[in-house]
Image: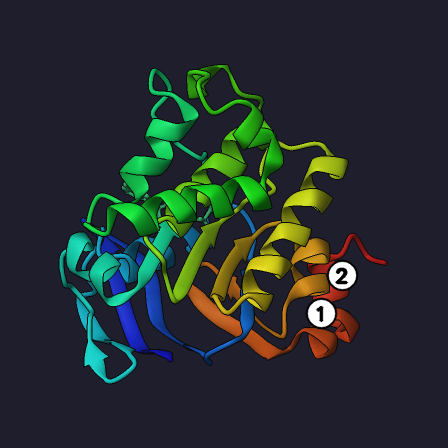
Amino acid sequence: MLKVNNIDVFYGNIHALKEVSLEVNEGEIVTLIGANGAGKSTLLKTLSGLLKPKKGEVLYQTQQIGGKPAQAIVKVGISHVPEGRRVFSTMSVEENLELGAYLRTDREEIKKDIANVYGLFPILGERRKQPSGTLSGGEQQMLAMGRALMAKPKLLLLDEPSMGLAPLIVKQIFEIIKMVNEKGTTVLLVEQNANMALSIANRAYVIETGKIVLSGTAKELQESEQVKAAYLGGL
Ligand code: ATP
């Protein structure tokens, strides 16, 4: 479904991604794990059109999407939930969800999809009129995911959904990611929480200072001594 071939991405002189290649097949949850500053967010920003690769290609289905504008990428079916959630805090929960559907014109379907999001995240339904800035961190993460789902993506890019959240909430969020995947959305999940990410993923990649250093099935990486020592707290 998605094929990244040897991309190089720079911020000025900073070489943030170095010949990165990875693949996501339809129906999978693939996770990209790595420490702070390894380049995880940079990769997602490149896939969603916020950054342009200097070299290499990004193929989605059969189209070359590397360097295309963000709006064109949403249109082909890729939605990005950025790190730090970034909901529109003065707008209500429901208005945020409506914004997620800004490229759609099918009003009736949009209403149904808002109801589906409330089915997935009942707390958002209860808070539908509330300004989203007043939601808890976990609720804001749910709203950011709900907003991305309103674009009806085939591929969902999630940037550190566990960041700053209590373990119980992280567990809930991960259960929902699994549910969204089971309903047919392919997921590329970027995480520092390798334990949780590997527990729901089919396959995984490890990124260190802009380079993919390891890849395999989630099970293989959970059992890898290198991954255990560096990312699973030496378990
Ligand atoms: P984190 O989890 O901390 O966000 P990350 O793995 O997502 O880490 P990136 O944010 O992708 O890492 O950053 C990769 C590298 O690029 C880092 O060295 C970072 O300092 C650098 N970088 C990121 N954004 C910029 C920017 N806007 N300008 C310059 N350098 C940047």
Residue under label 1, please give it.
226
Q: Nearer the viewer, residue 2 or 12?
A: 2
Residue 71 placement (x, y as % from top left): 17, 53
Q: Which residue is mark 2?
A: 229
Q: Is mark 2 within 8 Å of ligand 1?
A: no
Circles 1 and 2 in contact, beta carbons < 8 Å: yes
Residue positioned 44% across, 38% down in the render: 144
Q: Residues within 10 Å of mark 1 (few under 14, many from 20)?
A: few
Q: Is residue 169 left or right of residue 74?
A: right
Report if the beta carbon of the residue with label 1 is closer than 8 angstroms to ligand 1.
no
View extreme (front): residue: 108
The residue lying toward the viewer, choosing from 62 and 107, is 107
Residue 119 percent across, percent down from the top left:
57, 44
Taking the spot 36% from the left edge, 43% from the top edge, the residue there is 111
Residue 181: x and y in percent read 56, 65
Q: Is residue 78 visible?
A: yes
Judged from this view, the residue extending furthest toward the right is 235
**Badge 1 amino acid:** Gln
- Image quadrant in which the N terminus is located: bottom left
Q: Nearer the viewer, residue 191 or 94?
A: 94
Chosen colour scheme: rainbow
Q: Say if 170 sits above or below 55 in the image.
A: above
Q: Is residue 69 above or below residue 92?
A: below
Amino acid type indicated by mark 2 = Ala
The reply to whether residue 81 is in sight is no
Q: Secondary structure at mark 2?
A: helix
Q: Quadrant of residue 182?
A: bottom right
SS for callout 1: helix
